[in-house]
Image (cartoon, rainbow, N blue to C red):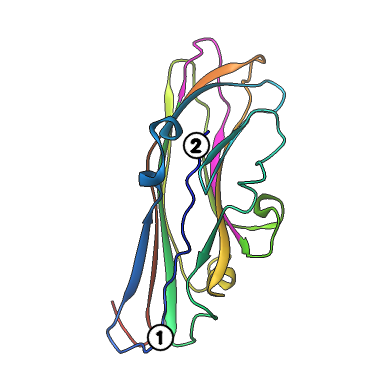
Amino acid sequence: MKKYYFPAVVLLFTSCAAGTIYHFEIDFFSFLSSEERQMRFFVPEETGAQLYFFPSVYLDLNGSGPDEAHRKGVEINLAATEVPDQVRLYLKFSCSIILKNISEDKTIPDASLSFIASGKDTENIYESGTVLFSTSLSEIQGGQEGAIRSLITITQGSSGYDILSSGSFLLGCAVMISPAQEGGEVEVLYSMDQCSIFFGGYPFGFIP
């Protein structure tokens, strides 16, 4: 599978003037090949299926977790040191994934999408990272499709904000697909049509 690696993303929140907004956006979707934007596979009865995103897309069909290239996700550097106290940091995540159940006689009970962050020295963020948010969908009947869509903002007080405001952290995303209710394999078509991360910061005294 072809892999795409993000360069270090750097935002310098310095010399914050009143009314100044700093922002940067990563359109992760544009980094993916057509093979990574859409995959067709069979979900095993024993383990279900897991898709790990960042720095590319890795499909796990045996329950072993992400491979070495994906255990750390992608490293984000917002500043050389911690984000200054006078800057209010916020992050927005936007993602849209479609899962189609191709097997007419099988039902997928549920699937979920999670964004996870951790300190940059973590070896596997999916084992010891902090879940920034998670969303799920209920059963997908045979021949039907379900959409996992999210648009969420992480600000001061949100889960994981202390990790993000450190200025350097690891970020990952995972989709978990449960095995078929009836047993046996279920064929799935996965499609992604959007995935972006928006980083921003503005002085505490500024009212957007």
Using the image, determine if residue 36 lies above or below residue 24.
above
Circle 2 packing at 10 Å, graded few (<14), some (14-19), many (20+), is few
Tag 2 near tag 1, CB within 8 Å? no
- Would you place residue 135 above or below residue 206 in this image? above
**Viewer-proximal residue, 87 or 139?**
87
Q: Identify the residue shown where x is 54% and y is 81%.
A: 81
Q: Does 112 lie within the magenta span?
A: yes
Q: Amino acid at mark 1?
A: Thr
Q: Which residue is mark 2?
A: 2
How far across and down, in percent of the image, does residue 186 sit?
57, 17
Left or right for 21, reference 82: left
Which region is colored magenta?
Answer: 100-117
Is residue 191 in view?
no
Q: Residue at x 39, y 85 (%)?
A: 204
Position in image of residue 19 (x %, y %): 27, 84
Distance of mark 2 from mark 1, alpha carbons? 37 Å
Q: Quadrant of the image for the C terminus? A: bottom left
Residue at the image point whose x is 30% and y is 81% from the top = 207
Query: Residue lying farthest top?
Result: 105
Q: Which residue is under mark 1? A: 14
In the image, taking residue 142 as reference, residue 163 lies left or right, namely right
Q: Quadrant of residue 121?
A: bottom right
Residue 76: mark: none
Q: Crowding at label 1, few (<14), some or many (≥20) Cα neighbours within 10 Å?
A: few
Q: Position of residue 102 (x, y in %)?
A: 47, 16
Left of 20 or right of it: where is 59?
right
Residue 109 shown in magenta: yes
Name which quarter of the figure residue 38 lies in.
Answer: top left
| Looking at the image, residue 202 lies above or below residue 104 | below
Q: Amino acid at mark 2?
A: Lys
- Choose between 145 and 190: the one closer to the eye: 190
Q: Nearer the viewer, residue 66 or 189?
A: 66
